[in-house]
Image: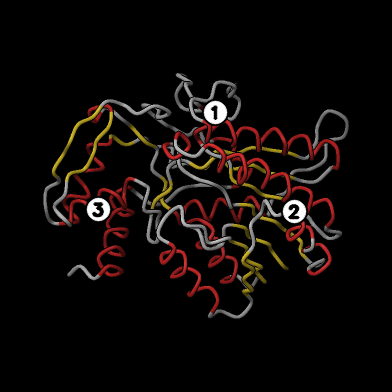
Amino acid sequence: MTILVTGAAGFIGFHVCQALLARGETVLGVDNLNDYYDVSLKEGRLAQLTEQSGFTFLRLDISDKDAILALADSHPEIRGIINLAAQAGVRYSLIDPYAYVQANVLGHLVMMELARRLPKLEHFVYASSSSVYGGNTDIPFSVQDRVDKPVSLYAATKRSDELMGHTYAHLYRIPMSGLRFFTVYGPWGRPDMAAFIFTKAILEEKPIKIFNHGDMRRDFTYVDDIVAGVLATLDTPPQDGGVGQPPHRVFNLGNHKPEDLLHFVELLEGYCGRKAIRELHPIQPGDVKETYADIAESQAILGFQPKTSLEQGLERFVGWYKHHYGWN
């Protein structure tokens, strides 16, 4: 079966492609290789994919309507779409808001228009984010919660994706599933995420910024567990329930175990073999104090069950980081 994966050179996209190839799927990977972070990291991921049979790479921007819609003619065999391409990061949305609307709103729309044109498409899976919960104070975050009070533009664009997904499922009966990821980390992770930022700074003996004076909790989720959830979702398209019940669902994919940020730092110190130089700062605009995923529906419908502890995951990440960047 041919699966189109956007954001294929990204962190989660790379790991999803690896897993799909490992189980014998044909993968068409799309990425624009933008310079939001170090392009060499994306190229390194991509190099591992392009050497495998069954993988084809196309350098495209998902907001390029003509180029993306042309895939309906050149690759009508596509049966699944996993749309992971996005402008990521809460804090960067304060700097370049236009990039978020371009990639996350227009890009998502273009991908759904492609889905309409694919005669064999069985399921459209797309990335949302735990950020859509915004200022919610009910813990843990449930997919039944209202999510109409985002605290960042990034969150607002991801909620827009969910609403558009519901609309297209209603209008065109395309089976669609949105996935709210909770703070994903692991080997080949993004340089703008805490595990990468802190590990780099600790090894280089540079200060790390700890926001809200360390009073933060995150539902850190290891990338292998996320990938298992993505593939389980792909394999479980929603059923069309008729009038008022379009084939659209949203799931939380998280570890269901929020961790104290300072404990996170302490673990990294242990695996790096040196103490962090800590700088305490107030919470940043757009940030939230705590994330915590209610995964009851993901467990019941997808069989989703995260297996990797924070200790295991961070040890693997630091091991990868040291090897990749030549730290002995």
Instruction: Tell me what residue is drawn at x 44 percent, y 23 percent.
Output: 139
Q: Is 26 placed above or below 160 here?
A: below
Q: Is 41 placed above or below 152 here?
A: below
Give neighbour class at mark 2: few <14, some 14-19, many 20+ (Cα, 10 Å): some
Q: Position of residue 126 (x, y in %)?
A: 64, 47
Amino acid type at circle 2 is Lys
Determine which residue is flagged by label 1. Answer: 142
Determine which residue is flagged by label 2. Answer: 65
Q: Is 151 placed above or below 199 here?
A: above
Observer-side mark, 2 or 3, equals: 2
Lower sequence index among marks 2 and 3:
2
* Circle 1 SS class: loop
Instruction: Tell me what residue is drawn at x 70 percent, y 56 percent.
Output: 81
In this picture, residue 129 sits left or right of residue 113: left
Q: Position of residue 150 (x, y in %)?
A: 53, 25
Task: Specify the quadrant that holds the N terminus.
Answer: bottom right
Task: Say which mark, if any, is on residue 199.
Answer: 3
Q: Position of residue 88 (x, y in %)?
A: 49, 45
Q: CA distance from mark 3 to mark 1?
A: 31 Å
Observer-side mark, 3 or 1, equals: 3
Observer-side mark, 1 or 2, equals: 2
Q: Position of residue 154 (x, y in %)?
A: 52, 36
Label 3–label 1 contact, CB within 8 A: no
Amino acid type at circle 1 is Ser
